[in-house]
Image: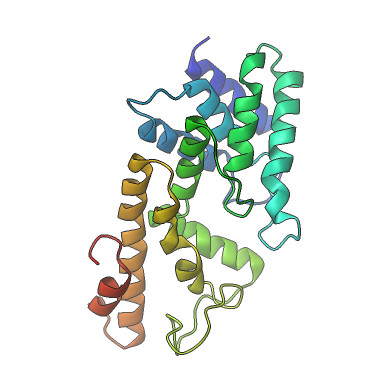
Amino acid sequence: MSLTHWQQRYENWLQLNWLHDDKAHDIAHLRRVWMSAKRIMQHSDANPMVVMTACYFHDVVNLPKNHPERHLASTYAAEETRRILQQDFPDFPFELLDAVAHAVQAHSFSARIAPQTLEAKIVQDADRLESLGAIGLARVFYTAGALGRPLFDSEDPLGKERELDDVKWTLDHFQKKLLGLPQTMQTEAGRLLAEHNADFLVHYMGKLCAELQGNLTSVDESVLRDFSPIHS
C-alpha cells in the first residue's frame, strides 16, 4: 500500500473523528507538517511511514496553550495514536508503533522530550517550522485572538525597558520562543529552513516598529541587525 493511500486513509479518519475548535491545528496544518517533513528527510535513511504517520497524529490530543497539562499533551497524543492505529488501522505495521509513538511524544516544545530517532527529529523540526514564516505569523496572532491576549505594547514593542511577557503581549512571544527555534532544530535541513522563516518574522518586527514611529514605508534596520538569524 502506497504512502499516498495511507495519507488519504489518515485524512479520512481525521475528518470523521478529530473534533476540536482550534483552527491553528487542523488537517491543513497536519498536511503542511508532512510536506515539510518530506523536504527535510530527502536523501536520509528515515522511515517515511513512521514520519508521515506521526505527522498526521501528533496533535490528535491538543490541549490549549493555557491548559495546566499542556506539557503532557504530546504524551497523551502518543498513547491515543497507538490506540487508534491498533483499533482503526489493524493493518498498520505493528513493529512501527513504538517509533511512531516516540515521534509523536517528542514533537512538543513544551514537553521537552529529546527525540531519540531520526524520524522523531524530523517530525519535531517539521512541526516547529509551522511556528515561523508567514504561516507562523498568522497562527501566533490567531492563537492570541482566541486567548484574548493584546497584540503588542505600543510604547515598548520589543520590551527594551520592561520584562518580556508573552502572556500579556503577543509580540513578546517572538523573542521568548519563536526566534530561538532555529537553534533547537535537530537536522541541518530543518535549521536552514527555520533560519530563513525566522528572518521573515524579524522583518515583520522591523516593519511594525517603523510604523509605530510613523514611518509607514520603511523598516527599522536596527531590528534586523539585532535579531535576524541571517543578517546578524
Tell me if I can see residue 66 in this picture.
yes
37 to 227, vertically: above or below: above
Residue at figure coordinates x 60%, y 26% from the top left: 99
Of 125 and 132, nearer the camera is: 125
Residue depicted at x 48% and y 19%: 4
Residue placed most toward the observer, 121 or 32: 121
Q: Is residue 107 left or right of residue 4?
A: right
> Residue at position x 74%, y 34% from top?
79
Who is closer to the viewer here, 209 or 183? 183
Query: Quarter of the image containing the C terminus?
Result: bottom left
| Type of colouring | rainbow
| Count of numbered tags | 0
Q: Position of residue 97 (x, y in %)?
A: 65, 23
Choose top left, top right, bottom left or bottom right for residue 155.
Answer: bottom left
Residue 81 placed where, x, y %? Answer: 69, 31
Is 34 on the left-hand or right-hand side of 69? left
Say left or right for 225 vs 194.
left
